[in-house]
Image (cartoon, rainbow, N blue to C red):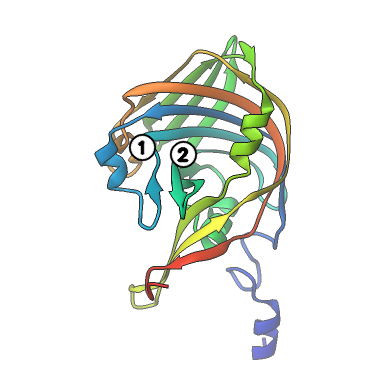
Amino acid sequence: MKADQVRSTAFAMPLTSPAYPPGPYRFVNREYLIITYRTDPDALRAVVPEPLEIVEPLVNYEFIRMPDSTGFGDYTETGQAIPVRLNGVAGSYTHAMFLDDEAPIAGGRELWGFPKKLASPKFAVESDVLVGTLHYGSVLCAVATMGYKHRKLDPAPLLASLARPNFLIKIIPHVDGTPRICELVRYGLEDVTIKGAWTGPAALDLHPHAICDVAKLPVLEVVSASHFVADLTLGMGSVVHDYLTGA
């Protein structure tokens, strides 16, 4: 392969068989279970990077079923997102993500900087209860439950929340192991349609684990819960801060 062919065809690794296709990435019937809980403020301060600011000591623990996603296929994801502010604008910082599909792990990490790890999350309806579980190997790390469709939710606040900017830390190492890219990245969700939204009683249990560290943001109190289904497009990102240059 000539050098000009490499330059014209290179998009993602491997060179001749990329792990994922170019975007945009559209998600159909994306199903969420989000449990918002109060946590230890000191634990939050230890993981939220400047220049982001903590709004309240809250965490959104999310389970997401993605049965139809462009290029990424059918997979399940779970993780923690933290409400933050940047320059007075409310948004969300993605702290941890665990999923069961290699393509979105590679694409999410390489393109945006999503903190994705391979694990075994499950999200399903069991009789009258929504159940989300996260196993890392054989070890149970998280259990979320919510009463199934007890009350309808007004979709307007959910749409407003999904319209807020989301922030990530993108880290790409150099070949000598030092950081070559270390950036605060912003991305958004676009063309969002909510097809249904509900709430109900909810509970969340997080277990300590050496590698799957969701319990380092402990559950002190469950504040709210939501279950909704949406179609949306995952927008591409932009760099808002470079940690290596300070710009």
Residue 19 higher or lower than 128, as above or below: below
Name the residue located 64 percent from the left edge and 27 percent from the top edge. Answer: 228
Question: Is 151 displayed left or right of 89 in the figure?
Answer: right
Q: CA distance from mark 2 to mark 1?
A: 8 Å
Quadrant of the frame with the N terminus: bottom right
Quadrant of the frame with the C terminus: bottom left
Residue 240 higher or lower than 150, as above or below: below
Question: Is 8 displayed left or right of 53 in the figure?
Answer: right
Question: Does residue 96 appear in the picture of this structure?
Answer: no
Farthest residue to the front: give it: 88
Q: To which residue does mark 1 refer?
A: 214
Residue 129 higher or lower than 161, as above or below: above
Q: Which mark is residue 79?
A: 2
Q: Quadrant of residue 123?
A: top right
Residue 207 position, x and y percent, is 32, 29
Relative depth, front residue between 79 and 163: 163
Contact, mark 2 vs mark 1 (Cβ under 8 Å): yes
Name the residue located 33 percent from the left edge and 73 percent from the top edge. Answer: 178
